[in-house]
Amino acid sequence: MRRFLLSTTLVLMAACLPLHHTGQPRRFIGVNCFDLARYADRADDIFAHLATNGVRVVRFWAFQKYCGPTGTNFARFDQIIAAGKHHGIQLLPVLENHWKHCTYNAGLEWKPPAWYDTGWRTEKFGGAPLTYRDYLHAIVRHFQNEPQILAWQLVNEPEIEPDTPASFATLRRFTRDVSRELKQADPYHPVSLGLLGLGQPATTGQQFRQLHNLPGIDLVTAHDHGYMNEPLAGKDWPLVENSLYADLLDARALRKPFIVTEAGIAIEWVNGDRVKRAELFRAKLRAFFAAGGTGYILWNYEPEPDTNYGFGPTDPVLPMLRQMAAELSL
């Protein structure tokens, strides 16, 4: 395993993803399955089904909430990695959530500014067994030799209110310091930040590019939410700032791969028409890859669908993904 990683370290650091024969980062289609750790015992069956439908990457919550009373029981994640290896699916683990969901939250709706300032180093937030820093070191060292991990993501949708220069400075310092810590613990895997990327506080305008223009951040990522009828939101806007297209242009300027790590369309937005939703996603995939995007990860695969954004094993989204993978030769 160590031999594999050493032989591919230069490729990962240069392109952040395995290279296609053209010399460009290999493109892929993926899905989120945020609660995958809860289904770890079924991961083999889940991945078998996803793999037959063109899915090559799964993004999921890898929070310490899933790791027992010590915060270091990685048995569920080990099962997920093993299943991914069996079915040729790579994983994009997310280490923490800005929002309260599925993590230790101290009864708050989101992470406060103080957490991004010093709390991530010093505070066992919300009664967590470990600080974020200690958890980060533990999990990335556990998996540092694992080629099934595509990349690490630091936080899901980080932002800091109010939208001031001081807030941006705090978020940029957090990004710089945490990515540096992660690279020290695991020098082999690419790192992404996890921004929503549509103009959230402390990430607006040129701040988005500056947050990704750090040596420890290898991938530019954003989310495609809120514009279901626009295949590439922002491309035809008079002002493209704070749009998905603006984020793609920033990635191009930084010469880093661009990945949409969430793309959601609520079923209620299409009046329950799942075929229509699949076709809207098809248009987004075509526009994204035509514009030079690297990876597009839909939100959210649910083995037992129970959210407005979820799609399950029989949803028309999955055969559409299989067709698109063939069309794009992914």
Image (spheres, grey):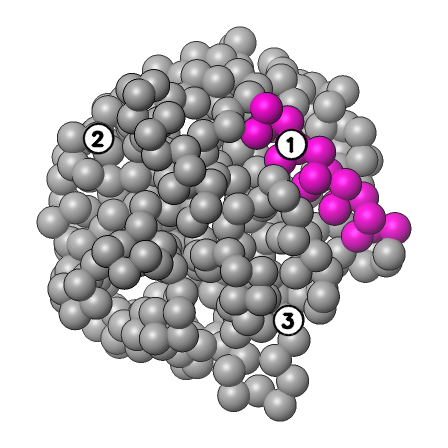
Among the two numbered marks 2 and 1 on one chain, the one whose residue lies closer to the N terminus? 2
| Residue 88 picture location, percent across and down | 19, 38
Q: Quick check: 326 above or below 3?
A: below
Mark yes or no: residue 105 visible.
Answer: no
Which residue corresponds to mark 1?
Answer: 180
**On the picture, is 151 further left or further right than 196?**
left
Disc 3 on helix, strand or loop? loop
Residue 279 picture quarter: bottom left
Say which amino acid is labelled 1: Arg
Labelled pair 2, 1 in contact (Cβ < 8 Å): no
Residue 147 is inside the magenta segment: no
Among the two numbered marks 3 and 1 on one chain, the one whose residue lies closer to the N terminus? 1
Q: Which residue is found at the position 21% from the left and 59% from the top?
A: 330
| Residue 189 picture location, percent across and down | 45, 34
Q: Quick check: 235 above or below 10?
A: below
Which residue corresponds to mark 2?
Answer: 85
Q: Between 276 and 115, which is closer to the camera in this rendering?
A: 115
The quadrant of the image that shows the N terminus is top left
Disc 1 on helix, strand or loop? helix
Q: Mark number for residue 242?
A: 3
Mark 2 Cα-neighbour bin, 10 Å: few <14, some 14–19, many ≥20: some
Magenta residues?
166-184
Q: Which residue is found at the position 19% from the left and 47% from the top?
A: 50
Residues at marks 2 and 1, CA–CA distance in whole angstroms: 28 Å
Residue 176 is inside the magenta segment: yes
Say which amino acid is labelled 2: Lys
How many discs mark residues in the rendered view?
3
